[in-house]
Image (cartoon, helix red, strand yellow):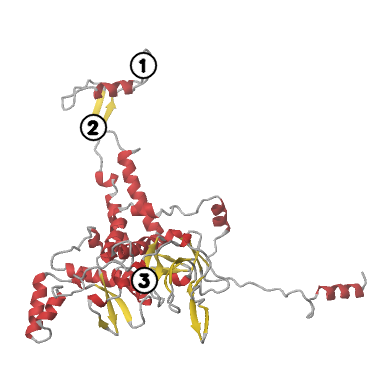
Amino acid sequence: MTLWDRVTSMMALTPRFDSVEPLQTRMAIDSFTSYPGLEEQLLAVQGLTSRPWRYPSIREALGVPAIFGAATFISNQVGSLTMRALRNEVELPPADRPRLIIRPDPFRIPREFYAGTAWNLATRGEAWWWVAARDVDDQALSLINIPPHEVHVEDNRDDPRYPIIKWRDRVMPNRDFLQIVYVRDGLRGVGPLQMCGAAVSVAVESQEWAANFFIEDGGTPSVWIKSAVELGEDPLTGVHEADTLRDQWMNKPHNTPRITDPSIEDVKLMGVNEQGAAMLQARGYQNAEVATMYNMDATLLNAAISGSSVTYQNVGTKFEDFLRGCLRPNYLEPIEQTMSDLLTRSTVARFNTAALTLADIKTRYDVYGVGIDKGIIDVPEARRFEGLAPGDVENAAVPFSPPQAVPSTIPVMRTAEPVRCNGRRMRGMVLTKCNRLLAEQGPFTGTCPRCGKYHEAAA
């Protein structure tokens, strides 16, 4: 090859500015993502893992009494609270509260709706609300608590602000599907059971080991008999002499004296260490770990922690710590803010947590007496603090949902096409078709706000 041929070859390999081929781009390594190594990838292909422990399922984790107790304690506490409404920072009377916060789900009592939301947050790390019905002003009328495992979320490449939400393989409008997260991790929420896998695995495995010890494969012999001579197989019967000796010992009546000959060197009763067999120390330690996972005091789970206890005098303080460290930031605040977004801009939803942190009755009445004597509060205010005043929010009746709040169909029964009004209206001096958009997805039941025509499940 001549020198000119070499120069021509090098020029041909050099990219030209007018070339239609794109220039080479280099991908930067994302320092915020921990990519698995080759060993982890090969194990994942075979369905294995390099960890010495496995991730338990949510059902297995809830089989641990401490975890189940923490989740139910939190969810039932949230379900026992009453929702208040404040407009321009002034609390509304119970009768003027929006019907949505009084009975969100038309098919269930409020306790089940709020407790179910907190249960999903505590066990799945997220909760989903479906706005099942809206009024003519486009305000939410009813909410349905959707199981998180039925919801699938995908990234929307066209508009990352609005991810693709699917419920039962049906794409749902983002405005009608509201997500409440314990901690957000990408498109989904995670909670204690999802992030504390090693601690949950220890709790599950220690409990299963203890159960297997007593029920299935474990256990120790109740009596140990040591022979003074070597035992072997009986040449006449073919039965081992150890089996014959054991059967002779077991065939004797219980609670009767036993006599041995010089061929028996020693007989011992083998007891079982119940604490060691049940792994009580390890499981007791896990109770404290579970309480730490949920940011609550271990004594609220009846866990015996050295130097701590719940007494009649400090129970109010314990629940105050529980409210501030666990309930308020992780459960109440997300639910309150999501509910407030569904109300009018001047109305805010807040849980009434006064009854949760009440001190003992003697302390409360002493404080009321001092406050009344000093002119800080009066008797009606003290009665309102105790929930004894007429019309108190804690004693207010829960009305039924309006008929418009009851969804006639579920999303899998709806059509994907928008519903428009086929009524008539006067436009200028000409009678024209209304064509008002009533719903993005059918069917629609209600009155058209433009022409006033009533539609019965229009699709």
Say if mark 3 contacts mark 1, CB within 8 Å.
no
- Residue at (36%, 82%) from the top-left corner? 345
**Dividing the picture into quarters, in which one does residue 9 lie?**
bottom right
* Up-down relation of residue 435 to residue 169 (above or below): below
Q: Residue furthest top?
A: 236
| Category of crowding for the residue at label 3, using alpha-carbon neighbours closer than 10 angstroms: few (below 14), some (14–19), many (at least 20) | many
Above-or-below relation of 299 to 448: above
SS for dot 3: strand
Q: Which mark is residue 234?
A: 1
Question: Local crowd at mark 2 within 10 Å, few (<14), some, or many (≥20)?
Answer: few
- Please identify, in this view, whether the residue under mark 3 or under mark 1 is nearer the observer: 3
Quarter of the figure with the N terminus: bottom right
Say whether disc 3 or disc 1 marks the residue closer to the N-terminus.
3
Cα–Cα gap, marks 2 and 3: 74 Å
- Dividing the picture into quadrants, the one containing residue 231 is top left
- Residue 432: x and y in percent read 53, 79
Ranked by sequence position, the earlier of labels 2 and 1 is 1
Reading the image, the residue beneath label 2 is 268
Q: Is residue 19 left or right of residue 422?
A: right
Disc 3 target residue: 141
Residue 64 x %, y %: 32, 53
What kind of residue is marked 1?
Asp
